[in-house]
Image (cartoon, rainbow, N blue to C red):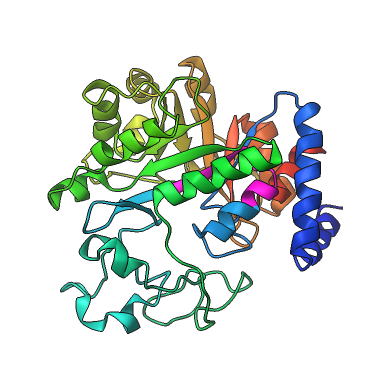
Amino acid sequence: MLMRTVNALHRLQAGSYLLWLGAAMVCSALAVAAEPRPLVIAHRGASGYLPEHTLAAKAYAHALCADFIEQDLVLTKDDVPVVLHDIYLDTVSDVATRFPDRKRADGRYYALDFTLAEIKQLRVAERFNAKTGAPVYAKRYASAASPSEFRVSTLEEELQLIQGLNRSTGRHAGIYPEIKQPTWHREQGREISKIVLPILARYGYAGKDAPCFLQCFELTEVRRIRRELGWQGRIVMLLNARGKERDGVDHDRLCTAAGIKEIAEVADGIGPAIGRVVTWTATGERKVSDLVKLAHEAKLVVHGYTIRLDELPKGCPGSDELHAALFRGAGVDGMFSDFTDVTLAWLKK
Ligand code: CA
């Protein structure tokens, strides 16, 4: 049944305008009949269908009825926050052919070394391996070699798009911005949070009840955002799959009862990697950890990452089983998904 739905949705993508209208109507009908259910966060937009973090991927995520749409944020040379998953440009754009002499000694092209005007010259493609040129997800939108008119967008351009769609469709999607690598930015002499927060505030996202969750992998930065920069909005502390983050904080320790209490002093929720919540043994047996229980006892919401139909966790038998384990087995309050429509369809069953 699910596969039939997925196939039908894939076929529908071809008739984009009709789908757009249809989705807008479906979304508003749902809004009327809305009841509390876990949130679906469009991970890098509708990244299962269009190149991640492009405005096209964000518009499509909105049309697919995502509750929240994610923005990963890094700074340009002229201190403009742009929406990119990595501090690098070379795995999602043609920077290496357009600016071949602008790489650092490690061979990588950093967004921080380019002005916004330069970054705007780049063509964005489906994520690919910078060494081989092969797409990371073979069945997605297009291979890296395909030319496209997609561009890197600024945080403000994306907020304008989402707020415009909120207005024109009457269905309100929230935002889910991530401060990327604050320690690294500081090592480069930049203060990314100090630049991003005033922009979010200017667009109406600063309050506790605003449709916004701010996210970060570094606890030291989450503390700073709350205590020194005085951010009143909701913050989600991201938890990696294993080990220490760049600020030296050990996430294995943060996933204990004591660690969760520490997070609860400054954050409203946690965003754990799926493997912190549920795993499967070699024989296909499901193991749910106590992390969601610990978080709920500390009054933290749990939004896990990431549901990918084409990259299931090790040993997980299928998409249905993955959704069931997370929402029914573990009781998460939301999930980041590359496939907003599939996750929403599962929740509505
Ligand atoms: Ca992210």
How many labels were placed on the picture?
Answer: 0
Residue 308 vs 51, above or below: the answer is above
Q: Position of residue 36 (x, y in %)?
A: 70, 23
Query: Over which residues does the magenta segment extend?
Result: 61-71
Horizontal side, residue 61 vs residue 235: left or right = right
Tell me the quarter of the image containing the C terminus.
top right
Image location (x, y in percent) of residue 183:
20, 45
Residue 90 falls in which quadrant of the image? bottom left
| Residue 303 part of the magenta-drawn span | no
| Residue at horizontal 79 percent and vertical 66 percent from the top | 15
Frontmost residue, 264 versus 338: 338
Residue 67 located within the stretch drawn in magenta:
yes
Q: Is residue 112 visible?
A: yes
Name the residue located 40 percent from the left edge and 26 percent from the top edge.
206
Provide residue 236's location: percent of width, then percent of height: 42, 31
Could you tell me if residue 314 is visible in this image?
no
Nearer to the camera, 3 or 234: 234
Q: Tell me: 142 left or right of 300.
A: right
> Residue, x 46% and y 73% (percent of image)?
128
